[in-house]
C-alpha cells in the first residue's frame, strides 16, 4: 500500500470509528489508542459519563433528560466564569417553543414580565386581568421558589418555563413582597395570556397637550405598534411625547433599531455591537422619522436590553431627557444557535455600546437626568407625573 493510500485508509478508520460512536457505540469499546483519543475530548467524556449513569444509577434516567442536563450544565459554567453574563441559556425543544410564543406576544402562564436577579426572578410587570394580577403580585416583588424549590442562581429561562404551562394547570410559587420582605406561597391556575404591548393617551398638563405612550416589550412587530401609537397621539393634538419604557425587559435588537427610526432622522447610529467572532457593527436608522415632537423617556430598574438601547439612542442622538431611576444595565447581546434535538442555545456573543460608546453593563445602566420614583403605596404614578411635568416645560 502506498503512503498516500495508508493515510487514506487510516483516515477512513477514524471516520468509521467516529460514526460508530455517534450511532451508539461507546469509547470503552474502541481499541486502546483510539479510546484514549476520544476520551480525551469533552464529547467523549460526556458520552462515557452519560452511559455510566444510564447503566448504573439507582433510578432510571433517560438519554434525553441527561442530554438536557448536560447542556444546561455547560451554560451554567459559562455564566459562573463570566459574572456579567446572566443571559446565556439552553432551551429544550419545549422551552424554545414557549420562548418563541412569548416573542410573538402570546403564551400560557400566569401573566408576568420578569428579570433574572440573584434571589430568583424580579417581577417587572404584571399584566392586567391575568392570574398573577388576581393573586396580588406586584412589580418589585421577587419570585424565590417554584413548587417549593429555591430558584436562586438559576437562569431566568429555565425558571420561567417551569412557571409557564398549559392553560388550566396549577403552579405554586414563593413570592417575596417588596414592601414587607415576607415570602408567601401562592398556587395559581395558568391561563392564556396575550401581551398588551402598547398603550397610549393624550393628557393636558399645564395647559399643554401631551402624548403618553407605553411600550412593554420589543416582541415581533413592536416597532409598528409603537409607530401607530405615536401617530395616534400626534393626531390627538399632542405637542410632545412621554415614552414610558419602565418594566420593559427588552427583546429583539432589530425592533429597537426600527423603533429608534420613528423618532430619529435616517442614518443615525442607534447601537454599536462588538463581538469576538462577528467583529464590530454599527446599527443605524434606515428610514426617516415620523415625528419631530420633543420626547421624554421614562425608565426604571426594569428597563433593560433593547429598551435601554432605544432610551440611550434617543438621549445621545436627539437629546431626549431621561426621567426615572437607573436602568438595569445589560451590556451583552445574544444569538440563538439551533441544535439537532430541536432545542437551541441562546448565547451571549458580544457587547453593545450606546452611540456615545458606553457599555451599559460597565456604567451600571442609564442614569436619568431627572430622578423620579413611583410610590407604590399611593394610587398616583409619581414618576409618570414628573415626566409629564418635565415635558410640559419643554414644549411651547
Image (tube, grey):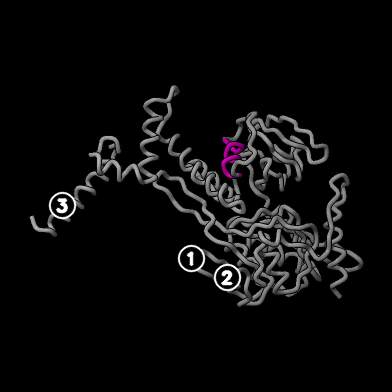
Q: Nearer the viewer, mark 2 or mark 3?
A: 3
Tell whether position 117 is magenta: no
Q: Which mark is residue 77?
A: none
> How dense is the environment of label 1, judged by Cα within 10 Å: few (below 14), some, or many (20 and up)?
few
Find residue 148 and report its image quarter.
Answer: top right
Q: Position of residue 157 (x, y in %)?
A: 58, 44
Tell whether position 162 is magenta: yes
Determine which residue is flagged by label 2.
Answer: 283
Q: Earlier in the sequence, mark 2 or mark 3?
A: 3
Q: Earlier in the sequence, mark 2 or mark 1?
A: 1
**Left or right: 61 in relation to 179:** left
Q: Relative to the observer, which residue lies in front, 339 or 60?
A: 60
Label 2 element class = strand
Q: Residue at x 66, y 30 (%)?
A: 172
Q: Residue at x 52, y 58 (%)?
A: 349
Determine which residue is flagged by label 1.
Answer: 278
Label 1 element class = loop
Q: Position of residue 196 (x, y in %)?
A: 68, 51
**Left or right: 112 in relation to 155:** right
- Residue 30 to residue 279: above or below: above
Determine which residue is flagged by label 3.
Answer: 9
Q: Position of residue 227 (x, y in %)?
A: 67, 65
Locate the C terminus and report the quarter of the image it occupies. Answer: bottom right
* Distance between mark 2 and mark 1 Cα atoms: 14 Å
Q: Residue at x 78, y 65 (%)?
A: 322
Residue at the outermost right position: 206
Residue at the outermost left position: 1
Please report the bounds of the magenta region as a residue range: 156-165
> How dense is the environment of label 3, judged by Cα within 10 Å: few (below 14), some, or many (20 and up)?
few
Magenta stretch, overall SS: helix
Q: Position of residue 156 (x, y in %)?
A: 61, 44
Amino acid at each position: 500500500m502506498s503512503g498516500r493510500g495508508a493515510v487514506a485508509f487510516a483516515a477512513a478508520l477514524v471516520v468509521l470509528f467516529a460514526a460508530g460512536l455517534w450511532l451508539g457505540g461507546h469509547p470503552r469499546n474502541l481499541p486502546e489508542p483510539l479510546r484514549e483519543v476520544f476520551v480525551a475530548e469533552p464529547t467523549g467524556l460526556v458520552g462515557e459519563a452519560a452511559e455510566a449513569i444510564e447503566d448504573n444509577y439507582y433510578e432510571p434516567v433517560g438519554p434525553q433528560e441527561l442530554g438536557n442536563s448536560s447542556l444546561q450544565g455547560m451554560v451554567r459554567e459559562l455564566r459562573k466564569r463570566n459574572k456579567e453574563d446572566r443571559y446565556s441559556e439552553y432551551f429544550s425543544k419545549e422551552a424554545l417553543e414557549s420562548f418563541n410564543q412569548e416573542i410573538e406576544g402570546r403564551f400560557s402562564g400566569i401573566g408576568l414580565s420578569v428579570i433574572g436577579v440573584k434571589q430568583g426572578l424580579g417581577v417587572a410587570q404584571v399584566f392586567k386581568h391575568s392570574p398573577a394580577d388576581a393573586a396580588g403580585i406586584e412589580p418589585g416583588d421577587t419570585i424565590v421558589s417554584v413548587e417549593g424549590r429555591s430558584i436562586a442562581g438559576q437562569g431566568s429561562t429555565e425558571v420561567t418555563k417551569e412557571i409557564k404551562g398549559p392553560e388550566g394547570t396549577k403552579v405554586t410559587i414563593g413570592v417575596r413582597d417588596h414592601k414587607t420582605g415576607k415570602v408567601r406561597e401562592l398556587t395559581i391556575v395558568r391561563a392564556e395570556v396575550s401581551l398588551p404591548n402598547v398603550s397610549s393617551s393624550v393628557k393636558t398638563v399645564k395647559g399643554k397637550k401631551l402624548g403618553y405612550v407605553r411600550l412593554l416589550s420589543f416582541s415581533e412587530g413592536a416597532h409598528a405598534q409603537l409607530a401607530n401609537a405615536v401617530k395616534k397621539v400626534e393626531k390627538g393634538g399632542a405637542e410632545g411625547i412621554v415614552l414610558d419604557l419602565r418594566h420593559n425587559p427588552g427583546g429583539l435588537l432589530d425592533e429597537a433599531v426600527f423603533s429608534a427610526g420613528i423618532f430619529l432622522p435616517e442614518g443615525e447610529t442607534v447601537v454599536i455591537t462588538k463581538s469576538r467572532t462577528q467583529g464590530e457593527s454599527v446599527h443605524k436608522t434606515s428610514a426617516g422619522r415620523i415625528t419631530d415632537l420633543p420626547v421624554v423617556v421614562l425608565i426604571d430598574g426594569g428597563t433593560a436590553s433593547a429598551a435601554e438601547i432605544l432610551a440611550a439612542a434617543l438621549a445621545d442622538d436627539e437629546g431626549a431627557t431621561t426621567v426615572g431611576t437607573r436602568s438595569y444595565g445589560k451590556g451583552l447581546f445574544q444569538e440563538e444557535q439551533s441544535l439537532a434535538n430541536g432545542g437551541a442555545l441562546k448565547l451571549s456573543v458580544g457587547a453593545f455600546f450606546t452611540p456615545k460608546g458606553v457599555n451599559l453593563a460597565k456604567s451600571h445602566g442609564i442614569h436619568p437626568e431627572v430622578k423620579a420614583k413611583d410610590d407604590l403605596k399611593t394610587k398616583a404614578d409619581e414618576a409618570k407625573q414628573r415626566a409629564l411635568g418635565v415635558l410640559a416645560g419643554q414644549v411651547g
